[in-house]
Amino acid sequence: MTPEEVGARLVALLAPVEATPSVSGGQQYARATVDVPPSSWSAAVRAARDDTELACDYFDWLSAVDELAEGFDVVAHLWSTRLRHGVLLRTRLPREAPTVASVVDVYPGAAWHERETHEMFGIGFDGHGELRPLLLPPEFEGHPLRKEFVLASRVAKPWPGAKEPGESEAGGGRRPIRPPGVPAPGEWGTVPTPAGAGGVGEGPRGGTPARPAGERPARPAPGARPARTPRAAAPADGRAPTGKPAPGAGPAAGEPGADAAARDGAGPGASAADQPVPGGGPVADPPGRDDRTDHDGGTP
């Protein structure tokens, strides 16, 4: 059967109930969609299962859609494993009292689908008998999939906006747009409005800066290098600026080892020939060019 034939067959089974058939999008995956009043919800699900031409013996899923002021749409998808066609059943509930009959007696597998829809949207299912929390802790307050539910994570960290592929990084990007149900920055909680977090319809962009501009360190000009600290000049007594003796200088007067160095001729300014050697006197100067025994008398 085509989606149009599936929808027309279900509407004929529900007569004289006012049901509206249509076809969903999805091209080759399109489904027959039938809108029924809440009072006929359970009867429509049973008719789709028990009719031999429809034979929707498989319950796929059940969920809801928040339509704001128009209420909630409860949607169920049924499938025929033998005839290979499906149908979407849909009913609209008022926002003030969103309650519909449970279909657990028709499809027992719908039990946890109804429990999830109950805790996420606050929709009641009469006859279910066990609408206890399924995914959320018992102390959780509110219904997260309702559009008026405040998304706390979006408030604490505003979405900075996005760039389309190919946009320049210097273009500034688009102004952030708040999703439905999220209050303007600075209107909820204790977090101040960050700079540049204003969204559409919230006045000029900007807000409380992270810190005053005067406290920010100055940036050097492009290409400029910071000035280098000059080193202190070495003192005349041969000491390094740190108080340590300069390379090649002996111990200073009054320091340990100064007297012994003076007696041995190893004080400041002593040459290598004056340095003591193990077992003898000072080291003799190396022989000159003319004193060499291998001098051949040639040109010096």
Image (cartoon, rainbow, N blue to C red):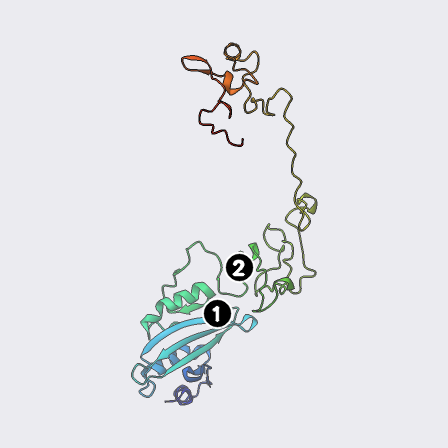
Direction from residue 120 to residue 48 in the image, left or right? left
Query: Tag on residue 24?
Result: none
Direction from residue 247 to residue 38 in the image, left or right? left
Please rate how many residues cluster around mark 2, counting C-alpha atoms within 10 Å: few if below 14, some from 14 to 19, many from 20: some
Which residue: 65% across, 57% down? 196
What is the distance, in whole Å, between disc 1 and disc 2 at their CAs?
22 Å
Residue 108: quarter of image: bottom left
Residue underneath mark 2: 151
User: In the displayed structure, would residue 176 be above or below residue 290?
Assistant: below
Residue 6: quarter of image: bottom left
Quadrant where the C terminus is found in the figure: top right
Q: Which residue appears farthest toward the left when viewing the image?
A: 82
Please rate how many residues cluster around mark 1, counting C-alpha atoms within 10 Å: few if below 14, some from 14 to 19, many from 20: some
User: In the displayed structure, would residue 81 be above or below residue 262?
Assistant: below
Q: Amino acid at mark 2?
A: Leu
The secondary structure type at the circle numbered 2 is: loop
- Where is residue 292? Give x, y as percent: 47, 24
Quadrant where the N terminus is found in the figure: bottom left
* Image mark count: 2
Which residue: 65% across, 59% down? 198
- Where is residue 116? Give x, y as percent: 41, 65
Residue 133: quarter of image: bottom left
Looking at the rendered image, the disc whose residue lies closer to the viewer, 1 or 2, is 2
- Where is residue 126? Give x, y as percent: 40, 69
Q: Amino acid at mark 1?
A: Pro
Direction from residue 128 to residue 98 in the image, left or right? right
Query: Tag on residue 98?
Result: 1
Say if residue 100 shows up in the picture.
no
Q: Which residue appears farthest toward the front when viewing the image?
A: 297
- Where is residue 58? Give x, y as percent: 32, 77
Q: Nearer the viewer, residue 294 or 222?
A: 294
Q: Nearer the viewer, residue 177 or 84?
A: 177
